[in-house]
Image: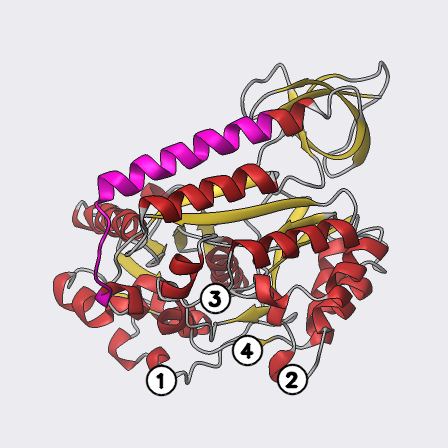
């Protein structure tokens, strides 16, 4: 039995592609190993979004080809977004790689992993002209790499947004939704396998169903998933701010199993920068949106992301962003420095910001958010919340860990559990009541009651 080792980089959407490829290979009789050094074939599923991710992908590819040169691996396959952006360059610079497959070729992993198959015969779909059609479904084999109680479900693929900083349309193709029934059936099967939390992901989740001519299909999907007995939590990631409808918010508010959580990347608050980003809006319109979300879904946790150092961002623009973050008091914030990516509209913009200035602004914004997060967390001390139990803590074998509804796995903070009632043996994936006893900037400490 041939062994295949996987290195999966980038976002959860990319991880689902890796899980599908692993499942396809396992069903065909391959053994999947976590140790690339033990593998006959090494598959590197790459990210090509920003410069740091591209460099990480290149480093992983070079590690894999080094294993091959030492005779530890016989075949190296490079997959994913980096291939879509730089296929010709990679093929020229890395002749030791046996096969390159892009995001639309996930289903061809069996051919790519076959020692006797000529990789030049692989079908190449030109993503740039929006012709990609690949979507996995409920019948696609899949080997999950997440914790046993949590699973991602990709509800759509691709994106049509014109965001000036983003290269995703050139790597993933046009926006296309999965069938409603396919998602429900996959969620039902995951529940039967012991999954308690499903996380709906896409490049733009809030547009789900629009290409079918449907309005507010995401709201219907949330309500339907909430009816599946085996599931406990339903979470939505990557919602676009202009598509946060009242129907969607009502579904989150009214569906007991829908976690009160909104992941909504805003990217900036200055009208000037948002216009340059081709996103539109301004600080006032975004503050009205945040107020509407909180009014419609009381107690909701809001996570967002921002970019500092975008071309044309002035000191005044950044100060407006700082004031926006102080005023809105988000539960969780991620901040990235702008990455100048060829092929994006922003690449040709004037008034580039010095990377050192961009980093300084990022550090300032994160420091400001840390203050907000600590204040919000301190306000939770003494209160009791529903928590999904995850077993031993990543920090210490002397502690357990779990997550509030407002904490997404490996993205937000955790609850460290230091006390469990005598005689209780909490089950991984179980929902328990936890009283908060301590608070830090990102993590909380509590006891199961």
Side of 213 where 191 appears, left or right: right
Q: Residue at x 45, y 45 (%)?
A: 320
Query: Which label sits on residue 280?
Result: 3
- Which numbered disc, 4 or 1, marks the residue that appears first in the sequence? 1
Q: Nearer the viewer, residue 378 or 392?
A: 378
Residue under pointer 1: 129
- Work out whether 140 lies above or below 381: below
Residue 176: mark in rendering: 4
Look at the image and tell me whether residue 283 can be seen.
Answer: yes
**For marks 2 and 1 on the same chain, the one whose residue lies earlier in the sequence:** 1
Left or right: 203 with respect to 293?
A: left
Residue shown at 79% from the left, 61% from the top:
251
| Residues in magenta, as a range | 348-374
Q: Earlier in the sequence, mark 1 or mark 3?
A: 1
Quarter holding the C terminus?
Answer: top right
Side (left or right) of 229 relative to 310 = right
Task: Say which element carries label 3.
Answer: loop
Out of 152 and 346, give the one closest to the viewer: 346
Task: From the image, tell me which residue sits under label 2.
Answer: 212
Q: Are marks 1 and 3 in contact (CB under 8 Å)?
A: no
């Amino acid at each position: 039995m041939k062994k295949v080792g996987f290195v999966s980089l980038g976002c959860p959407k990319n991880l689902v592609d890796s899980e599908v490829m692993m499942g396809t290979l396992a069903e065909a009789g391959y053994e999947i190993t976590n140790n690339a050094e033990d593998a006959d074939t090494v598959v590197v599923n790459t990210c090509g979004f920003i410069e740091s991710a591209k460099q990480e992908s290149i480093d992983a590819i070079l590690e894999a080809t080094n294993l091959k040169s030492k005779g530890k691996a016989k075949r190296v396959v490079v997959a994913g977004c980096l291939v879509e952006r730089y296929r010709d360059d990679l093929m020229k610079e890395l002749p030791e790689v046996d096969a390159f497959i892009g995001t639309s070729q996930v289903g061809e992993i069996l051919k790519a992993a076959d020692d006797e198959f000529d990789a030049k015969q692989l079908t190449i779909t030109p993503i740039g002209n929006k012709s990609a059609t690949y979507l996995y479904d409920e019948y696609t084999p899949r080997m999950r790499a997440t914790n046993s109680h949590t699973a991602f479900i990709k509800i759509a693929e691709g994106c049509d947004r014109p965001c000036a900083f983003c290269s995703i349309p050139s790597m993933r193709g046009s926006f296309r939704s999965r069938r409603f029934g396919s998602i429900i059936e996959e969620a039902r099967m995951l529940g039967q396998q012991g999954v308690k939390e499903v996380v709906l992901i896409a490049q733009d989740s809030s547009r789900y169903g629009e290409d079918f001519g449907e309005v507010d299909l995401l709201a219907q999907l949330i309500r339907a998933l909430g009816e599946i007995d085996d599931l406990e939590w339903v979470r939505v990631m990557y919602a676009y701010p202009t598509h946060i409808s009242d129907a969607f918010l009502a579904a989150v508010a009214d569906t007991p199993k829908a976690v009160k959580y909104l992941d909504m990347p805003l990217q900036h608050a200055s009208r000037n920068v948002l216009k340059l980003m081709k996103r539109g809006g301004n600080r006032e319109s975004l503050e009205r949106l945040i107020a509407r979300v909180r009014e419609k879904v009381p107690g909701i946790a809001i996570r967002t992301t921002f970019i500092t150092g975008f071309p044309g961002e002035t000191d005044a623009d950044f100060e407006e962003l700082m004031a926006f973050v102080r005023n809105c008091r988000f539960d969780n914030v991620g901040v990235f420095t702008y990455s100048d990516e060829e092929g994006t509209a922003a690449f040709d913009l004037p008034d580039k910001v010095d990377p050192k200035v961009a980093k300084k602004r990022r550090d300032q914004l994160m420091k400001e958010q840390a203050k907000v997060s600590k204040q919000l967390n301190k306000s939770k001390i003494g209160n009791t919340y529903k928590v999904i139990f995850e077993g031993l803590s990543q920090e210490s074998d002397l502690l357990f860990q779990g997550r509030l509804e407002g904490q997404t796995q490996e993205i937000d903070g955790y609850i460290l559990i230091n006390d469990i009632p005598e005689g209780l043996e909490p089950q991984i994936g179980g929902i328990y009541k936890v009283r908060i006893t301590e608070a830090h900037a990102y993590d909380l400490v509590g006891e199961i009651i």
